Amino acid sequence: MRFAPFIVLTALLLRPSPGQAAQPGPLAINGIAVKVNDAVITFREIDGEISDTSMRLLRSQYGRQPDVFRQKLEKLKSDTVELLVERQLILDEFKNAGYKLTESYIDEVVKRRIRNQFGDRVTMIKTLEHEGISYETFRQRIREDFIVNAMELKNAGTERIIVSPHKIETYYAQNSDKFKVEDEISLRMIFLANKPDQDAAATKKKAEDILAKLKGGAPFAEMASQNSDDSHRTEGGLRPAETRKTLREDLAKEAFALKAGQLSDVLERPEGCYIMKVEEVRPAHVKPLNEARAEIEKTLRTDEEQRMRKAWIDRLRAKSFVKSFAD
């Protein structure tokens, strides 16, 4: 999470103090994976950074493919190591530059974290004890997170990035394929599910009665809100704009054959019956620049932020000692 506007950063990161003494890095408590200047990153730290959720996701996706699973796990570990190295480089830069941090502000951040994450201090202490984490470690992690966020904001924050209209227009001209919009329809739908206590014929009969009322002038939205069994009934059956790819293939074939304002017949499917009405047809087109401008600006800002951050981390790495050790 990014902290605070730049004005808060400048209030907290004061001018370097001449001759500030360097603090010793953390002691290795098990096997050393990487040494970064005076600090070490242990294998236990790396394992601790990989969440149970990430591991469960890997196993669910690749558990039946042992070789692929091992490759993905190694990639996850490699990425984790890189993030930890970058984190330590940033913390060292903060320390070596002599920046000062207002500890009372960190105390306030800790209080907010306790309130938002745990509710109260007693629950926080019990939770940390269960996880084998001391309060001091918890507070230190929050302090380091703040430092990293503040330093990233200072050196590679979007506040420093200016995206000119010319850059936006050039990107649009060179990437027109990215702004192609497929055929779209605005669609209302009524779905009547086959229920266990009635046969499919009864469902079809009800759908035909509804269709007759629609053809007689009954408002589709009203009929959908009263009868439909799907999640869009509260919106009168109106669905988000659909393309041929986002709508189920068998329904898309029927829907895209309709013109604006037309009703479908009753469409029987194993799960129930559908009635559709097309509100609007929007042919395939290239999104105009005025609609794409905000999206392009966000993309260019993100790309530039990543470029600036990489250049900054590369500079930190070039003047630091980083050595990896075999597992």
Image: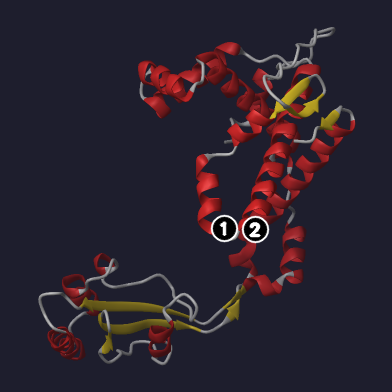
* Vertical arrangement, residue 70 with respect to residue 233, above or below: above
Whether residue 125 sits left or right of residue 54 in the image: it is left
Which element carries disc 2, helix, strand or loop? Answer: helix
Identify which residue, 217 or 227, lies in the foreground.
Answer: 227
- The residue drawn where x is 63% and y is 71% is 179
- The picture places residue 73, in percent across and down from the top left corner, at 64, 48
The residue labelled by disc 1 is 62
The residues tagged by marks 2 and 1 sit, at their Cα atoms, a distance apart of 6 Å
Q: Residue at x 71, y 37 (%)?
A: 81
Amino acid found under the numbered disc labelled 1: Tyr
The residue identified by callout 2 is 68
Residue 180 image-quadrant placement: bottom right
- Whether residues under marks 2 and 1 lie with C-beta atoms below 8 angstroms apart, the answer is yes
* Quadrant occupied by the C terminus: top right
Report the quarter where the N terminus lies: top right
Kind of residue at disc 2:
Val
Residue 40 position within the rendered picture, expressed as x and y whole percent measured from the top left? 75, 23
Q: Earlier in the sequence, mark 2 or mark 1?
A: 1
Q: Is residue 149 visible?
A: no
Q: Is residue 325 above or below residue 96?
A: below
Relative to 239, is 31 above or below? above
Tell me: 3 left or right of 40: left
Question: In this rendering, does residue 141 appear at all?
Answer: yes
Q: Label 1 neighbourhood size at 10 Å, few (<14), some (14-19), many (20+)?
A: some
Q: Quadrant of residue 271?
A: bottom left
Q: Secondary structure at mark 1?
A: helix
Q: Residue at x 21, y 76 (%)?
A: 193
